[in-house]
Image (cartoon, rainbow, N blue to C red):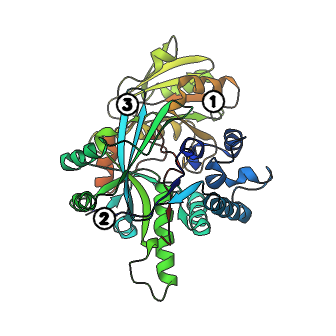
Amino acid sequence: MVRIKPFRGLRPQPGLEAKIASKPYDVLNSEEARKEAEGNPYSFLHVVKSEIDLPGDLSPYDSRVYEKAAENLRNFIQNKWLIRDEKPLLYLYGQQMGDHTQYGLVAAVHVDDYLEGNIKIHELTREVKEKDRIRHVETTNANTGPVFLTYQASESIDKILDKVRQAKPVYHFTTPDEVTHSLWIIEDQKMLQTLGNAFESLPCAYVADGHHRSKSAAMVGKKRREANPKHTGEEEYNWFLAVFFPHNHLKILDYNRVVTDLNGLPKKEFVKKVSQKFDVKKVCCAQAAKPAEKHRVGMYLKGEWYTLKARPGIFDETDPVDRLDVSVLHRNLLSPILNIGDPRTDDRVDFVGGIRGLTELEKRVDSGDMAVAFALYPTSVEELMAIADAGKLMPPKSTWFEPKLRSGLIIHTLDD
């Protein structure tokens, strides 16, 4: 069972939506966010990356950063840049990137469904990022960015949402990254009830993107329950902001790896060690190295591209985690040859979203910042769901979803 609830969303004053909607907090570093918001006081980056309004040498985890986020959110409301809907509603969020479109239901989802496993996870969270999001939610008293959830596509839900799309959206705009965003309001009471019943009939939902947002929202709800002697279960802090997309709408891109050094190995010896577990072939260029199927990896080393084909027997095809390409690469190359430990904490490895292309891998290596890069075949939605259903966890940075959900289009506050 998955519970959803209409809520009184905070959203942009019509006409300001394109100026307010921002990239999510975790795809930009502070300097990139500062540059992106330059000259735009409406950008929601002033809330989700509020360090951009403070001295550049300040830690993003300084208490003043969270206080600034809350102050900026209050100003957005006081200036009427954000308005609150008068009654609880659901919303439909549509995105188009090139020939790919996806439509997701925006709703409040129950904290207990996360805590009890009805909303399944596939990835561990990092404590420092978890604490960061908890402080942000607590200080702003709001879920300022939605959790990206998916569910097994339902024909009955599709029919309802298709009907919603027949109306004119309240927002429709294209961002500089050439993604078109649309938002519809769902206020018909019968439709709201029907959608609630349809989601309650789902066996579960899955966190596709936003593990730190979902964990922090649940922890804030739990803390507020424990601190409230008059807790009834009806409080708004029992719910958090999410967007539900059917699994067949989603697009996962590759999530690639770059490593700072070869662990003291000369190039020739490194390639020889790699050849023990992979069939290694030098190719002409990035296009030839880009993996076209599972268990193939592209490798960029010293200005040259190679393809790596996993040899039979180096992974367990029956294990949904072990057979993932990110696992195959880590267990047979990154860990034993390059001595990369926990990829969540080892600062010798970094991750590059597939949206940046293989030219970004070349750039990182050619600059001298990195010694070697690996291009991976994308993880599938079906693999994600199978791992979550098995109660297992993916290695970190296994999936890169595009397009990204914009922050600031809908905000859920914890006091209604």
Tell me the tag on residue 182. Answer: none
Please tell me how crowded label 3 is: few (under 14), some (14-19), or many (20+) other residues with Cα within 10 Å. few
Q: Which residue is mark 2?
A: 3
Q: Position of residue 348 (x, y in %)?
A: 63, 41
> Which comes sooner in the sequence, label 1 or label 3?
3
Q: Out of 118 and 22, give the one closest to the viewer.
A: 22
Question: Disc 1 or disc 3, which is closer to the eye?
Answer: 3
Provide the secondary structure element on which disc 1 rests. Answer: loop
Of labels 2 and 3, earlier in sequence is: 2
Tag 1: amino acid:
Leu
Q: Left or right: 193 with respect to 28?
A: left
Q: Amino acid at mark 2?
A: Arg
Label 1 and label 3: CA atoms lie apart by 43 Å
Q: Position of residue 290 (x, y in %)?
A: 45, 21
Residue position for label 1:
265
The type of residue carrying mark 3 is His
Please give the residue where the numbered disc 3 appears in the rendered image.
100
CB of mark 2 within 8 Å of CB of mark 3? Answer: no
In the rendered image, the quadrant that contains the N terminus is bottom left
285 left or right of 249 in image: right
Q: Is residue 201 above or below residue 337?
A: below
Question: Residue 414, image x and y in percent?
Answer: 50, 69
Q: Earlier in the sequence, mark 1 or mark 2?
A: 2
Q: Secondary structure at mark 3?
A: strand
